[in-house]
């Protein structure tokens, strides 16, 4: 294999990778809360799978919201429901891994705060949608007819 020299610092393309939007981290906390305590889904209102910022998050939320919630005592003892969430989510997001579910659980500070995590998500999602509809030349809102 030929040797490829290190690119000069000015030549790398790392600065072209945009950091995740703030809503991404809110989504992670919300999904982690729902993975830990699926029965809290009823406390989360006004959010649908299509309101998530990534296909992976949308697929996970769709899986969580369509699968029947597990018995809390069973959920505390085994991963059967999480395995079903993973399998269902992979149907829409093939790159989804058990490791990522673990990450979501780790970034969720308090599952009982799932409704609070949903509030900024709704707000940030609405703001992002509004900004997507603003014409940068004149600041007018583009109205979709379809």
Image (cartoon, rainbow, N blue to C red):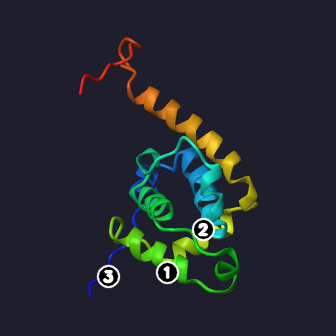
Q: Position of residue 141 (x, y in %)?
A: 38, 17
Residue at (45%, 64%) from the top-left corner? Answer: 63
Front residue (pair 9, 126): 126
Q: Which residue lies at the image location 44% right of the left edge and 32% below the top edge?
A: 129
| Helix, strand or loop for disc 2 | helix
The secondary element bearing badge 1 is classed as helix
Give how far apart the Cα atoms at labels 3 and 2 are: 45 Å
Task: Please name the residue that numbered disc 2 is placed on.
Answer: 35
Residue 135 visible from this viewpoint: yes
The circle on residue 83 is: 1
Expressed as whole percent of the image width and height from the top left, the position of residue 136 reads 38, 20
Q: Are marks 3 and 2 in contact (CB under 8 Å)?
A: no
C-alpha separation, residue under disc 3 versus residue under disc 1:
43 Å
Residue 48, x across and y down, in percent: 46, 47
Q: Which mark is residue 3?
A: 3
Mark 2 closeness class: few <14, some 14–19, many ≥20 residues within 10 Å: many
């Amino acid at each position: 294999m030929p040797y490829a020299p290190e690119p000069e610092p000015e030549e790398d393309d790392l600065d072209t990778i945009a950091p995740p939007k703030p809503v991404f981290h809110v989504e992670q906390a919300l999904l982690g809360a729902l993975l830990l305590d699926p029965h809290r889904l009823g406390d989360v209102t006004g959010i649908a799978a299509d309101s998530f910022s990534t296909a992976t998050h949308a697929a996970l939320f769709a899986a969580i919201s369509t699968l029947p919630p597990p018995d809390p005592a069973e959920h505390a003892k085994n991963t059967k429901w999480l395995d079903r969430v993973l399998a269902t989510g992979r149907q829409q997001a093939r790159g989804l891994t058990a490791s990522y579910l673990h990450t979501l659980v780790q970034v969720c500070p308090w599952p009982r705060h799932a409704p609070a995590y949903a509030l900024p998500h709704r707000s940030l999602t609405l703001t992002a949608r509004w900004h997507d509809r603003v014409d940068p030349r004149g600041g007018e809102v583009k109205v979709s007819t379809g």
